[in-house]
Amino acid sequence: MRVLRICAALLALSACHKPAQQPGNEAAPAVEAGPQKGVDRSHKGDAAPAASFNTPDGKPITLAKFRGVPVLVNFWATWCGPCVKELPTLDKLAAARRIDGQLGIVAVSQDSGPQASVDAFLKKLNVTDLAPYHDPKMALSAALGPDTVLPTTILYDAQGKEVWRYVGDLDWTSPEAAKLLAESGPAAKKG
């Protein structure tokens, strides 16, 4: 049991990175660089994945449901330290954007446990404005590729095309975040 706890702690300390599987019998590189923290524009224009995840009441939904307004999609997990640090600032952004309705914010838990555990975790953090979307099978993050780290946040425009993704945690109430969010289009500049 102690070995499992140590392994879990090491996973949390590794910046919540899910390493890529090496194909065939090829040797793994000595040092894996992994994605760099910050803005990644290499997927600009890519369509949002069609993979489904769960609404707070457990019904399947896809990102296509959010077309018509820009949407900020955050991938997080309860076991990811940087995710936990970031969630309260994302919650504040959700509270501010709820008023103007010009930017959808979808925080999707990648925890394999039941919805009730996600709900309880957010309640414990006093996160009240983020709806507890849940992807226990991690289908949505898997559709983005094997090197998806947590947290990763992706901004999609009103047509469901990727604008940018932010790898790692960010204070979503900061001037840096405001500048990035302004890229979603004229409507999202409000608030």
Image (spheres, rainbow, N blue to C red):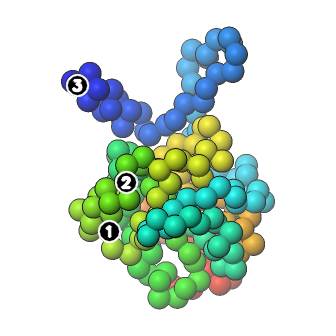
Q: CA distance from mark 3 to mark 1?
A: 31 Å
Three-letter amino acid code of the residue under disc 1: Val
Three-letter amino acid code of the residue under disc 2: Pro
Labels 3 & 1 near each other (Cβ < 8 A): no
> Residue at 59% across / 49% down in the picture?
139
Disc 2 residue crowd, few under 14, some 14–19, many 20+, Cα 10 Å: few
Disc 3 residue crowd, few under 14, some 14–19, many 20+, Cα 10 Å: few
Outermost residue to the front: 59
Residue tagged by mark 1? 127
**Can residue 101 be spotted in the picture?**
yes
**Can residue 169 be spotted in the picture?**
no
The secondary structure type at the circle numbered 2 is: loop
Residue tagged by mark 3? 1
Labels 1 & 2 near each other (Cβ < 8 A): no
Mark found first going from the N terminus, 3 or 1: 3
Mark found first going from the N terminus, 1 or 2: 2
> Residue at 38% across / 59% down in the picture?
115
Which of 48/165 is in front?
48
Q: Tell us which disc is closer to us: 3 or 2.
A: 2
Query: Quadrant of the rendered structure where residue 89 is?
Result: bottom left
Could you say where residue 22 lies in the image, as x and y percent from the top left? Answer: 64, 21
With respect to residue 93, does 33 lie above or below? above
Three-letter amino acid code of the residue under disc 3: Met
Residue tagged by mark 2? 114
Could you say where residue 18 lies in the image, as x and y percent from the top left? Answer: 52, 35
